[in-house]
């Protein structure tokens, strides 16, 4: 029970709180009731990003939540549905609303950092990985905004740039003697600069060395531009701070980076172009054991932060829950979204008690699992003997017990 003698931690600036969908929405409420409200006098500006409310507001609520994040600087977000055709029908939507994460990322001009939560008993597939590897993924352009042509037969493909001033630059791509395919990609310096600054800022924040890798030896203009922008910004704005923090910025080729990652013990940030980051973040999360144990934080170049879990809304468990069946859904990444946001709020507002609480909440979550109490997904992969499988709610209650013991 709640200890009446315990003073709740006071906040000065609100967190931006973005509620979500399905099973993660259920967990969200459990987490607040058991792990936040008893200990913190929570100040939050609440936005309901559940699909029903997004539809009611014509998605305006998503934009409002992103603007609020710009205003207050720290947000915590629950997983949300990005609707496909089936969801449009299921939720009777006015239209196929876009991904909330994409909208928020575009408004904040941010970079997403994903890192595994490491616990004893959930061993990485790569035996020498001792520390988390954080993937920073550039989230603009490249193949995700490419245009493509099915080449029907013989002909010449050209890359043409027509400047507003009338200047024309032309390169022959290929002279086709039969059918084939074509793809045009682009990126813009402004987005690459934001990506670089977010990466350098987050490396300083977390006191971790930063790696960046492209294929500039082959792509002498496109990838080389990424390399050059990173280097210029680092030298001009961040080198002295990195030296003072005792961390380094390290550039290498993407194939060399992959080889080094496999042999490393982890403990750094690996910045990747859009496609590389898409692929490598899945490799890292799978190799560390579980997508349910991945944190995700969006960092803008001007230092705004939005914390969330790296996974989706766990629809399958939600329908079991609606049918009155017991679920054992892993809430760890969502708990870490809360702890990350509370810690950052405490840092920015100079509230040590809030930072300490966030540390203890994470430690209590990890200790509960290491003591053998966990959800079913972890019980299936743990090396611990005879784990106790807890349902969704009881796992969170077990963490509360551990936490109360620490406080």
Image (cartoon, rainbow, N blue to C red):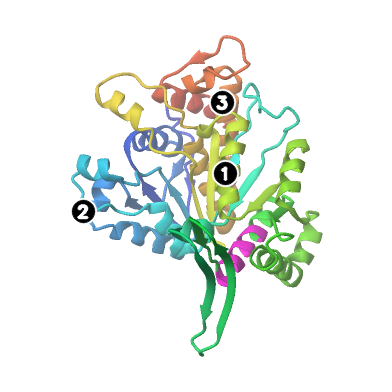
Rendered residue at 73%/33% (across/down)? 130
User: Tag 1, which secondary structure?
Assistant: helix
Q: Give the main secondary structure, helix, strand or loop, of the magenta stretch.
A: helix
Disc 1 versus disc 2: distance between alpha carbons?
Answer: 35 Å
Relative to 28, say whether 106 is above or below. below
- Provide the residue designation for mark 2: 56
Rendered residue at 60%/55% (across/down)? 273
Q: Residues within 10 Å of mark 2 (few under 14, many from 20)?
A: few
Give 231 or 403, whichever is nearer the viewer. 231
Q: Position of residue 9 (x, y in %)?
A: 49, 45
Res 390 → quadrant: top left
Query: Which mark identifies residue 405?
Result: 3
Relative to 391, say whether 124 is above or below. below
- Provide the residue designation for mark 1: 279
Q: Position of residue 190 (x, y in %)?
A: 56, 71
Where are the magenta residues, as a range?
A: 188-200
Rendered residue at 51%/48% (across/down)? 341
Disc 3 versus disc 1: distance between alpha carbons?
Answer: 40 Å
Q: Is residue 19 left or right of residue 130?
A: left
Furthest residue toward top: 386
Number of numbered tags placed on the structure image: 3
Circle 3/circle 1 CB separation < 8 Å: no
């Amino acid at each position: 029970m709640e200890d009446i003698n315990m003073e709740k931690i006071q906040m000065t600036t609100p967190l931006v709180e973005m509620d979500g969908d399905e099973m993660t929405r259920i967990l969200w409420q459990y987490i607040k009731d058991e792990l936040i409200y008893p200990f913190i006098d929570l100040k939050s500006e609440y936005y309901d990003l559940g699909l029903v409310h997004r539809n009611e507001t014509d998605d305006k609520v998503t934009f409002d939540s992103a603007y609020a994040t710009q205003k207050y600087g720290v947000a915590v977000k629950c997983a949300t549905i990005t609707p496909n055709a089936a969801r449009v029908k299921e939720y009777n939507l006015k239209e196929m609303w876009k991904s909330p994460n994409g909208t928020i990322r575009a408004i904040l001009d941010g970079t997403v950092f994903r890192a595994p939560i490491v616990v004893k008993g959930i061993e990485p597939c790569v035996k020498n990985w001792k520390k988390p590897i954080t993937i920073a993924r550039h989230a603009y352009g490249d193949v995700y905004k490419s245009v493509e042509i099915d080449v029907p037969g013989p002909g010449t493909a050209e890359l043409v740039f027509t400047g507003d001033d009338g200047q024309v630059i032309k390169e022959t791509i290929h002279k086709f003697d039969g059918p084939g395919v074509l793809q045009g990609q682009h990126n813009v310096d402004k987005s690459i600069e934001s990506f670089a600054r977010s990466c350098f800022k987050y490396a300083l924040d977390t006191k971790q060395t930063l790696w960046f890798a492209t294929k500039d030896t082959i792509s002498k203009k496109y990838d080389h531009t990424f390399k050059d922008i990173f280097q210029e910004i680092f030298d001009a704005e961040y080198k002295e701070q990195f030296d003072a923090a005792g961390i380094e910025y390290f550039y290498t080729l993407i194939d060399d980076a992959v080889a080094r990652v496999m042999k490393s013990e982890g403990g750094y940030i690996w910045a990747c172009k859009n496609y590389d980051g898409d692929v490598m973040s899945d490799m890292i999360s799978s190799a560390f054991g579980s997508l349910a144990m991945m944190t995700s934080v969006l960092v803008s170049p001007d230092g705004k932060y939005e914390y969330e879990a790296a996974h989706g809304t766990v629809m399958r468990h939600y329908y079991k829950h609606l049918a009155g069946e017991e679920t054992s859904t892993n809430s760890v990444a969502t708990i870490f979204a809360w702890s990350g946001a509370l810690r950052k709020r405490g840092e920015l507002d100079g509230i040590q008690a809030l930072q300490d609480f966030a540390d203890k909440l994470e430690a209590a979550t990890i200790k509960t699992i290491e003591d053998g109490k966990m959800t079913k997904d972890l019980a299936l992969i743990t090396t611990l003997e005879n784990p106790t499988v807890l349902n969704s709610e009881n796992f969170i209650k077990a963490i509360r017990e551990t936490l109360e013991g620490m406080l």
